Amino acid sequence: MSPETILVINAASPSVCSDDEVRHYVAAIQDFMPEFSRAWGLPEVDVAFMAHGQRIPRGFGHLQIVANDSDQAQALGYHEVSRDGYPIGYTFAKTGRAGGNSISGTLTHEIFEARCNPYIDRQILGPDGRRWDLEVCDAPEADEWGIEWPMPSGPRVLISNFCLPSYYDFRAPPGVAYDYRGLLKLPIPAMLPGGYLAFQEPNGAWGQIDAFGNNRRARMRARPQPFSRRYRAMVRDWQESEVQTA
């Protein structure tokens, strides 16, 4: 496998999420990935599967790990940078399933965001001076806005919806599509119910806005890992502001 391959590792207990289940998700993600790559003008990438109990290769370019329980309250997943400086993501299968959330939806959420913002350092400067994190699945992240992808080898797989580059263009003409399914009607900071956005004020303070809707827990996918660089910056002066919806 090349460093351009995204390696999905099933580290969850077989009773929580079997190898066959994750393998089916990976096949769907591999099938869908050209759609995402074209939408964002990214080079194509392979998505490979590694079964439970196998040794993870050191220094691999992009890892996505399906684990059991979250290491922070109610978090469904997050993506970070590994100690070796590579993108790495986590999907918490037991936590997500207990809350009625799709494992494949969280997995694709983290894969897509790590593809567009692998080092969690890309921001979009708005006309008001705020800098918005480029996290492409946060605004339409709830499962109800996902993409049902047909699979000849088995049941459909839920793929996370994601924003298009036009969503981050404050000068985009009216009527363009802002997300893959065309559900958002305005660019950033518009959200669908269940969405979440993080921003940085001109003075450096961090803030967030949420559109809880009927799925309050969905936003937890977007929360950064405790003690990560991003988390340390945000927790110092975290602030809440009003809900905004599309």
Image: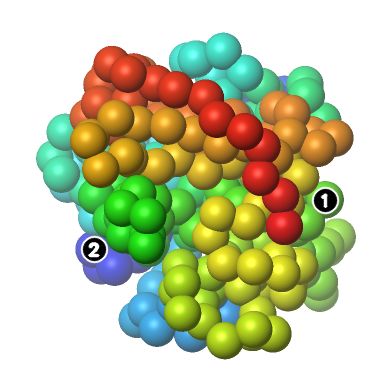
Is residue 142 or residue 69 the one in the foreground? Answer: 142
Name which residue lies at 61% across and 52% down.
Answer: 139
Residue density around tag 1, few if under 14, some if 14–19, many if 20 or more, within 10 Å: some
Name which residue lies at 61% across and 73% down.
Answer: 178
Mark 1 vs mark 2: in front = 1
Location of residue 205 in the rendering, given as x and y in whole percent from the top left corner: 29, 30
The amino acid type, in three-letter code, at marker 2 is Pro
Left/right placement of residue 11 relative to residue 133 reads: right
Q: Quadrant of residue 201?
A: top left
Residue density around tag 2, few if under 14, some if 14–19, many if 20 or more, within 10 Å: some
Q: Name the residue under label 2.
A: 3
What element does badge 1 sit on?
A: helix
Is residue 174 or residue 216 the one in the foreground? Answer: 174
Residue 77 visible in the picture: no
Q: Mark 1 points at which residue?
A: 144
Name which residue lies at 23% across and 63% down.
Answer: 3
Residue 41 visible in the picture: yes
Location of residue 69 in the rendering, given as x and y in whole percent from the top left corner: 57, 18
Is residue 213 or residue 153 the one in the foreground? Answer: 213
Name which residue lies at 66% across and 61% down.
Answer: 161
Q: Report the Cα–Cα distance between label 1 and label 2.
A: 33 Å
Whether residue 164 is situated above or below residue 130 in the rendered picture: below
Q: Quadrant of residue 17?
A: top right
Q: In which quarter of the image is the C terminus?
A: bottom right
Asked if the residue under mark 2 is in contact with the one under mark 1, i.e. CB atoms within 8 Å, the reply is: no
Between discs 1 and 2, the one toward the N terminus: 2
